[in-house]
Image (cartoon, rainbow, N blue to C red):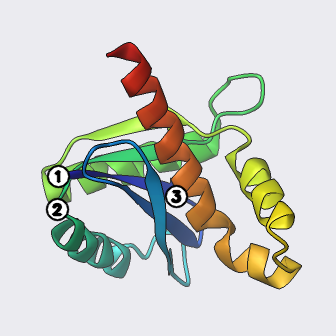
Amino acid sequence: MRIMGLDYGSKTVGVAVSDPLFLTAQGVEIIRRDQENHLRRTFARIEELVQEYEVSEFVVGKPLHMNGEEGERVRLTREFGEKLERRTGLPVTFWDERLTSVEAEELMREAGLTRTEQKARVDMIAAQIILQDYMNAQNTDR
């Protein structure tokens, strides 16, 4: 079984999965949609990936403000996570994602990716960072 990390945004969902030993996270893809509230195809694709990767739980990035307060994006992300949990029957954990997009952009810049390549991948890399941070914290607690 694996963990799936998700970076939920207004028009995209970045997807990452853990390895079977829960040590490393790998970016999988970015699911795109035309409008934020059109989630049917997004959930259908996530369910396909759950089957493909044998996912047993989700970690969804929680977009807190830099001061730690919750805003509208957190509310929308919670709603997404609750719908995902109801639809799949798998547990959802929310994880602080502050600065993950900044970290993702920095990593891609260091790797020599162009701005266009960075823009195309940032959500997937952010999902990977969210999942890796979560797994690192869990492994430290054990």
Residue at 46%, 61% in the rendered image? 26
Q: Which comes before the other along the chain, label 1 or label 2? A: 1
Q: Residue 54 carries which label?
A: 2
Residue at (53, 55) in percent of width and height:
127
Give how far across and how far down residue 140 sits, in percent. Answer: 43, 19
- Mark 2 vs 3, N-terminal side: 3
Residue at (79, 50) in percent of width and height: 102
Quadrant containing the C terminus is: top left
In which quadrant of the rendered view does residue 59 lie?
Answer: top left
Q: How crowded is mark 1: few (under 14 residues within 10 Å), some or many (20 or more)?
A: some
Residue that carries the numbered disc 3 in the rendered image = 8
Disc 2 versus disc 3: nearer the observer: 2
Q: Is residue 75 visible?
A: no
| Amino acid bearing label 2 | Glu
52 in relation to 26, above or below: below
Q: How many labels does the image show?
A: 3
Q: Distance between the Cα atoms at labels 1 and 3?
A: 22 Å
Q: Give the distance between the C-alpha atoms of the residues marked 1 and 2, in whole angstroms.
A: 5 Å
Which residue type does callout 1 highlight?
Met
Q: Distance between the residues labelled 2 and 3?
A: 20 Å
User: Dividing the picture into quarters, in which one does residue 92 lie?
Assistant: top left
Q: Nearer the viewer, residue 93 or 85?
A: 93
* Residue 97 x/y as whole percent: 61, 40
Q: Name the residue under label 1.
A: 1
Give whichever of 115, 80 is nearer the camera. Answer: 115
User: Residue 126, position in %: x, y?
Assistant: 61, 55
Q: Are marks 1 and 3 in contact (CB under 8 Å)?
A: no
